[in-house]
Image (cartoon, rainbow, N blue to C red):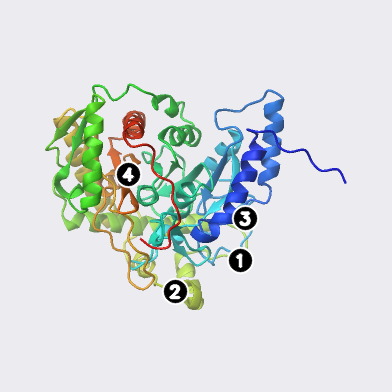
Amino acid sequence: MVSSPAPAPGSSRAAVEQLLARIESVDPLVNAVCTLHPGALAQADALDREAAAGRVRGPLHGRAVLVKDNIDTHDLPTTAGSLALAAAPPPGRDATLVQRLRDAGVVVLGKTNLSEWANIRDEASTSGWSAYGGLTRNPYALNRSAGGSSSGSGAAVAAGLAPLAVGTETDGSITCPAAFNGCVGIKPTVGTVPTDGVVPISRSQDSPGPMATTVRDAASLLTVLAADGTDYAAHAVPGRLTGKRIGVPRATYWGYSPHADAAAERALALLAAEGATIVDGTDLPAFGDELGEDELLVLLAELRSGVEDYLSSRSGDVPRTLEDVVAFNRAHSATELAHFGQSLFERALAGPREGSREHLAARSRGLAATRDGGIDQVLREHDLDALVTPSYPPASPIDLVNPDWFAGGCTAPSAIAGYPLVTVPTEIAAGLPVAVSFWGTGASEATLIEIAHGYEQARDRSTGPLAAPTFATFV
């Protein structure tokens, strides 16, 4: 028997073989990958043949990506973590963003676990758990949350299971797992990356985006996902911090975690040393509870119609309405409702519909508060390029009995406004990653990438890249 020749060093096949071996050895600990692509090596071989023939599709040719399991792939299941979709045939076609990945010569390595239905099912949920994919754990401490809802995408990048991953965010679902797992996450302006073929929560706030180990890699992936003519990676270059004015909105978005605050203060010092002007006292107006109530009303109204539109695209014996999903969960309560319920689904069925007076008024109030009366107002009044805040506290312990609880976070204003966030790890605090997030106005991704890359490079010169996870059992 003649053995196959060894893959050439640097080939896509060699890289994919290494990743598959890494997944086999490490993923049983973190449970980030819910579905592997059986043809991953065949994809890599085909791309290597193209490269050998002089056809290189772009900077990501032959590299591997993991895709969150709420994004349609024609050749792999798409379940949103729910058993209601687990037995269905794969979707009839790729989501547009997945087709863009394939066109760019990226190997689709598989799908990542998520908080079921992107964490919109119940108010007392546990991030990183789904009935289909099980529980994803943080590679820095296996008793700690991987965040959500892009739990598997963040944990996979941190654990070295893939250099690139795609997540989705409605409010915190890229930023939180990026911060908890110590990787870079970019939540683009809503509409920058298309959402067709993505299991929805909200037309107003959903935004797929890249997760990676470096800002430049995340920016390269955003270039492919957005396909808007902008080379975002071209902004991840040295020398772009000089002259940037960065505001520090301390009220609300600082002060909830001594660990996160201390790391963010050191980040400010590095930014200033690189030529940025740090502007304190750039607080957003205080938002009352009514802003969160309006946001939830908008999300639940759009969830109901969005899920029904999505389910109509799927073949096989699947639910067709949100009522059907609720009924399925009740009928399979021993598995689907083992750890928490579906109170948000039930509220969506009982609440206002998309396009109703209540929905439109809540959306209008949210935009007015977070755009002209919030982020844009502060940027304009202080002549700022961006804002910077701690992202989240260090990851909280996993608790499948009690609901998630976080001391604070930075995502709500940008989520409601539909504006971008770029999240970059800062350091390890008490054994766990912490991060900073750079905020901007709509379509300011290029500027935020310049700032984030400049900070990342300054961090690396000062303390080195973030230490790799050791898969500790307890922190």
Horizontal and vertical percent position of residue 371: 23, 40
The reply to whether callout 1 and callout 4 are in contact (CB within 8 Å) is: no
Q: Which mark is residue 427?
A: 4
Quadrant for the C terminus in the image: bottom left
Label 3: which secondary element? loop
Q: Please name the amino acid that badge 2 sits on.
A: Leu
Front of the two marks 3 and 4:
4
The reply to whether callout 3 and callout 2 are in contact (CB within 8 Å) is: no
The reply to whether callout 2 and callout 1 are in contact (CB within 8 Å) is: no
Kindly report the distance in space between the C-alpha atoms of the residues bearing marks 3 and 2. Answer: 24 Å
How packed mark 1 is, by other alpha carbons closer than 10 Å (few <14, some 14-19, many 20 or more), is few
Q: Please name the amino acid that badge 4 sits on.
A: Glu
Label 1: which secondary element? loop
Q: Please name the amino acid that badge 1 sits on.
A: Asp
How packed mark 2 is, by other alpha carbons closer than 10 Å (few <14, some 14-19, many 20 or more), is some
Label 4: which secondary element? strand
Lower sequence index among marks 4 and 2: 2
Above or below, 411 against 332 in this view is above
Q: Which mark is residue 337?
A: 2
Residue labelled with disc 1: 317
Q: Please name the amino acid that badge 3 sits on.
A: Pro
Front of the two marks 3 and 1:
3
Lower sequence index among marks 3 and 2: 3
Lower sequence index among marks 1 and 4: 1
How packed mark 4 is, by other alpha carbons closer than 10 Å (few <14, some 14-19, many 20 or more), is many
Q: Residue at x 11, y 38 (%)?
A: 281
Front of the two marks 3 and 2:
2
Q: Residue at x 40, y 50 (%)?
A: 181
